[in-house]
Image (cartoon, rainbow, N blue to C red):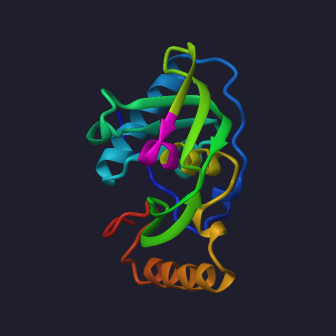
Amino acid sequence: MAILDILVYPDPRLREVAQPVEQVDDDIRYLADDMLETMYDAKGIGLAATQVGVNQRVVVMDLVDEGEPEPLVLINPEILSREGAAMGQEGCLSIPGFYEDVERAERIRFRALDRDGEPFEQEAEGLMAVCVQHEIDHLDGKLFVDYLSELKRKRIRRKLEKLVRQGRVGASGQKGRA
């Protein structure tokens, strides 16, 4: 397994729409394993393949602290339904150090393929619902800052560009890494 570089906003590759996975094979499983290792190293709870420069519809999440028994691998995930709305603080490994309130659906139903290519559907609420919506947004080229005012988005962009220039946030999005 390997730790991959996490792209930092405003890297234009974060705006690419990921392509569906045609076949779940060992390459996709290795990618998921590398993404999990990268996510753990960055102390995150979710990561989309587009955040590591891979244009595939693959997401990993670990919400074990929220009652999920094991990390999730979602391949070609899609939201089937949304209910309610709630505001909550979100952060992002591609936008390190920034947290803002974002409105998301309180409950969702989604489907995906698991790491073995088996289809499943699941309902989610709370943090899991937020995380699934956030990561699917990444696969669609959308970031949580897109839900913010233009002024806040520009402020965050300028600060991150400055941190990258100063070497305080590297290409991997993690402090102290180039």
Q: Nearer the viewer, residue 177 or 148?
A: 148
- In the rendered image, residue 89 lying in the magenta stretch gets the answer no
In the rendered view, does 78 fall on the left or right side of 26?
Answer: right
Residue 149 visible within the image = yes
Instruction: Tell me the residue at 57%/35% (across/down).
Output: 58
Specify the quadrant that holds the C terminus: bottom left
Quadrant location of residue 34? top left
Does the magenta run of residues contain 128? Answer: yes
Q: Residue at x 72, y 36 (%)?
A: 19
Q: Position of residue 68 (x, y in %)?
A: 34, 32
Which image quarter: residue 89?
bottom left
The residue sitting at the front extreme is 84
- For residue 146, above or below residue 66: below
Residue 55 can be seen, yes or no: no
* Rendering coords of residue 23 (x, y %): 65, 17
Q: Nearer the viewer, residue 78 or 22?
A: 78
Percent x, y of residue 78? 66, 34
**Residue at the spot 62% in from the left edge and 32% down from the top edge:** 77
Task: Estimate the x, y position of residue 176 in percent, counting from the top left.
Answer: 31, 69
Q: Is residue 143 above or below residue 66?
A: below
Q: Which residues are magenta?
A: 124-130
* Secondary structure predominantly adopted by residues drawn in magenta: helix
